[in-house]
DNA sequence: ATACTAATTGCGAGAGATTCGCATCTTCTT
DNA sequence: AAGAAGATGCGAATCTCTCGCAATTAGTAT
């Protein structure tokens, strides 16, 4: 019997690649598959991009990570623990700011009550212009 | 001097392709570049996909259309006039529902006041599960 | 410890979406 | 009517992500 481990607890096999992918997502905050691969390669140069994609998908299936589409092409991945905030994506500078989920509470409730739409707040990307990119006067 | 026209007013040349792309976006509500091309081909079979992409970009630059990423790969384009509602994207069935902007008014104001983030409501995609995909009981 | 089965990895090919370069053709201007 | 700038078509090139397959590895049973 193998020793307990957070990955095994989820019914997953424990491979170096898988652990490194998860660790990379956690350290990077939010990152594209490419960025995750780059990060992993620091300690495990041989890892294949396919493996990164497959592990991200696997980890998402068991709820350890989640992905969001923040605008441009690619998806970005987050560790599940860190999804306690909304993502404010600035269309100008591309920065991704955070805001606590509570800010959206009323909004989410309205959508649920009036439209039967159950918003997935953790999968939430909000577009706009961040403070830094708004002309100070005007 | 050419006659006035909404496209010329924006400093753009008037080509059949350009007009058709704009018309297609307006008629389709929200559509991917592929769908726009398909629509245009009904009356102008020879149009090239590159041309559609380029015109969508051009039209976006002058503010006549806008695009949003509704989740999966591709971008979808909307006519600027029609952006009077939010998009509720269902992660399960992929459907795109609508809700009036007002629902988000408070939310938007909170973000502006507390975080200096100017939300672009028209460029807003909300993820979640639509009424049809939520198990009725459970 | 050893053998076994199923999951996982690497790798290369492949699909889908979008962009680019370039020669040709159009639009708008003079 | 002629010219310059801009737009179109076409094909090639990118990028991103997915798949199939054989070789490898983890976890389990013996």
Image (cartoon, coloured by chain):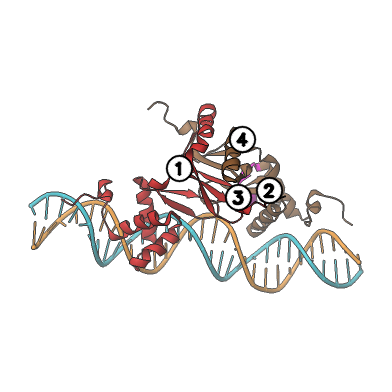
Chain colours: A red, B brown, C orange, D cyan
Q: Position of residue A38 (x, y in %)?
A: 41, 64
The question of residue B33 being in magenta is answered with: yes
| Res. B72 in view | yes
Residue at 48% x, 40% y: name it. Answer: A101
Q: Chain of mark 2?
A: B
Q: Is residue D26 left or right of residue B29?
A: left
Which residues lie in the magenta part? B28-42
Which of the labelled discs sits on residue A131, or is there none? 3
Tell me, yes or no, whether dots 3 and 1 are on the same chain: yes
Give the overall secondary structure of the magenta segment: helix
> Cα distance, mark 2 to mark 3?
25 Å
Image depth: mark 3 or mark 1 in front:
3
Image depth: mark 2 or mark 3 in front:
3
Image depth: mark 2 or mark 4 in front:
4
Label 2: few (<14), some (14–19) or many (≥20) C-alpha neighbours in 10 Å = many
> Cα distance, mark 3 to mark 4?
19 Å
Residue receiving disc 4: B105
Nearer to us in this view, A116 or D13: A116
Tell me the element at label 1. Answer: helix
Q: Chain of mark 4?
A: B
Residue receiving disc 1: A122
Tell me the element at label 2. Answer: strand
């Amino acid at each position: 019997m193998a020793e307990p481990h957070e990955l095994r607890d989820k019914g997953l096999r424990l491979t170096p690649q898988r652990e490194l992918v998860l660790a990379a997502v956690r350290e990077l905050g939010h990152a594209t598959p490419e960025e995750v691969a780059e990060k992993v390669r620091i300690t495990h140069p041989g890892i294949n991009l396919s493996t990164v994609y497959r592990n991200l998908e696997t980890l998402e299936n068991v709820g350890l990570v989640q992905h969001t589409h923040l605008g441009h092409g690619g998806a970005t991945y987050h560790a599940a623990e860190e999804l306690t905030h909304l993502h404010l994506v600035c269309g100008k500078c591309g920065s991704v700011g955070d805001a606590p989920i509570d800010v959206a509470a009323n909004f989410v409730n309205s959508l649920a009550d009036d439209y039967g739409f159950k918003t997935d707040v953790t999968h939430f990307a909000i577009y706009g212009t961040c403070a830094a990119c708004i002309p100070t006067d005007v």
